[in-house]
Amino acid sequence: HIGYDVTGSVLGSIVTTVTVMLPSFLLVLYASHFIRRHKESAIIKGVFAGLRPVVIGLIASAALLLMNRQNFPDNTWSILIGVASFLLVYFTKIHPIFIICLAGVAGLVIY
């Protein structure tokens, strides 16, 4: 948006987007190459083992922040959908992506 506002052209928008995204893309590309090369290392395995609880905590934090009266006026249905989704993932062999889609459809129908 800024590139388009400054230059008045789509080219400016493209150049701005590429220059903002390129450093992050290259860093992730290098990191994935490094991790793939050293995936058998005890240090890399330890780092990823330590990151698992952090990722779970971040996802849980985001979920708790989004559970408010503005997003879910009636928490009863939301809690039921969440519990049903968890139970389906935990006790069946249904793919989690399918269950997420089902939960989305249930939320769309209910809300």
Image (cartoon, rainbow, N blue to C red):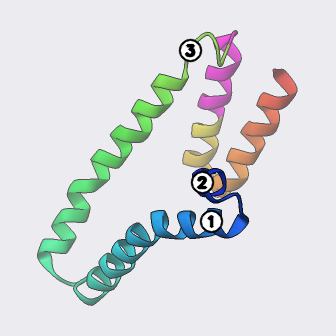
Q: Which residue is mark 2?
A: 6
- Say which residue appears at 33% left-offset and 85% top-offset: 33
**Residue for badge 3:** 68
What's drawn in magenta, residue-wise?
73-84
In the rendered image, which quarter contains the C terminus? top right
Q: Is residue 60 above or below residue 10?
A: above
Q: Crowdedness of circle 2 by 10 Å Cα count: few (<14), some, many (20+)? A: few
Q: Secondary structure at mark 1?
A: helix
Spatial distance from mark 3 to mark 2, Cα to Cα?
Answer: 39 Å
SS at mark 2?
Answer: helix
Q: Quadrant of residue 36?
A: bottom left
In the displayed image of the protein, which residue is found farthest to the front? 7
Q: Amino acid at mark 3?
A: Asn
**Mark 1 residue type:** Gly
Mark positioned earlier in the residue sequence (3 or 2): 2
The residue at 34%/73% (across/down) is 27
State the residue position of label 1: 12
